[in-house]
Image (cartoon, rainbow, N blue to C red):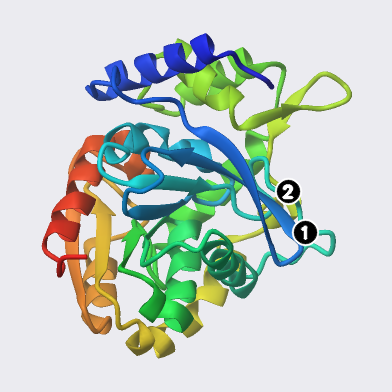
Amino acid sequence: MTRSALEERAYLRALGAHAGIEVQAIDPPVHRYAKSGGLAFHYLDWGDPEAPPILLLHGGGQSAHTWDPCCLILARRYRCLALDQRGHGDSEWSPEGAYEIEDHARDIAGFIESLQLRLPILAGMSMGGINATACAVRHASRLRALVSVDVGPDVQYEPVQRLMQGLGAYRRFKSPEDAAERLAKLGARRARSLLKDTLSRNLRQEGDGSWTWKYDPRTLVGMSAEDILAPRKPLWGVLDRITCPVLVVRGGDSDIFSPSDAAEFTRRLPRASCVTVPNARHSVQTDNPRGLADAITSFDDGLAPR
């Protein structure tokens, strides 16, 4: 769906008003593509291209646009690169359905190399946080830091199982307006009009006129919590290889990533600290973008100068 510059700026103003963010000096991101591992990857490029880079990875079923509210803040300081991971958003789908953690980790490393990013902060939420962690296991020396948002090798099973069941129940919609109406009833913390505008960036229209999520169904549909969580367990045995600084972020209202999960993940990493962002559930970046952005910048301020 092609949008005019006026529509993009109106969307950013509404998003900023919702989050209490001043957006007058922020330009809409540039839509770009890069190749990695034989696939074309779409990403949103925010801010000064000469600013320190931060690479942002969305959760499962989401897209790069989940970082829009955070980028309204972070782009004042960083070049923000919000990536649609394979099988998500406007990036290509894997022909053979290769969506393992290591597939994503290779993509991330290849993306950093293709753009010649120098010591980026690598930040990921949920699935993106796991993929970022796996990438950091092999490439910690190429990162300034890792930020893992509301996820670790262990999370709470029952909330994840409910989430997976919900994905199946909310798969197709008559329109973006229908999607906004149905998802608002689940407790989405946005005005209905803004929720529709946000969802329209993560939905695609099918040949029969219905709307569905942009992600490849093979990444999530029909999976159980066990299918999602079991492949993450081996990360416990290699966390000592992540020698770069790590910030473990937990949403204060999250039922998926418990305080004990966050504490154990932090303890097992060589150079980690932990912060809780209040007034946020699992999707910290949308529930409290200012709180998350402040946590990231404060963490970065505490690192050695670039």
Asked if labels 2 and 1 touch by Cβ distance under 8 angstroms, the answer is yes
**Which residue is disc 2 drawn over?**
216
Residue tagged 1:
94
Q: Is residue 261 left or right of residue 201?
A: left
Element assignment for label 2: loop
Q: Secondary structure at mark 1?
A: loop
* Residue 226 seen by the camera: no
Q: Position of residue 294 (x, y in %)?
A: 18, 44
Instruction: Name the spot of residue 171 as percent of width and height, x first.
Output: 68, 35
Judged left or right of residue 28, residue 273 is left
Is residue 112 or residue 298 the one in the foreground?
112
First of labels 1, 2 by sequence position: 1
Q: In this view of the protein, can residue 306 be seen by the observer?
A: yes
In the figure, residue 210 lies in which quadrant?
top right
Number of the front mark, 1 or 2: 1
Image position of 2 with respect to 84: above or below: above
Give the residue furthest to the right. 207
Residue 294 lies left or right of residue 13; in this view the side is: left
Callout 2: 10 Å neighbours few (<14), some, many (20+)? Answer: some
Mark 1 crowdedness (10 Å alpha carbons): few <14, some 14-19, many ≥20? some
Q: CA distance from mark 1 to mark 2?
A: 9 Å
Q: In front here: 92 or 126?
A: 92
Residue at image point 40% right, 45% down: 80
Return the x and y of residue 258 as percentages of the image width and height.
28, 61
Residue 144, above or below 78 = below
Pick the residue in front: 78 or 65: 78
Q: Quadrant of the C terminus?
A: bottom left
Residue furthest out toward the front: 50
Residue for point 55% across, 26% down: 199
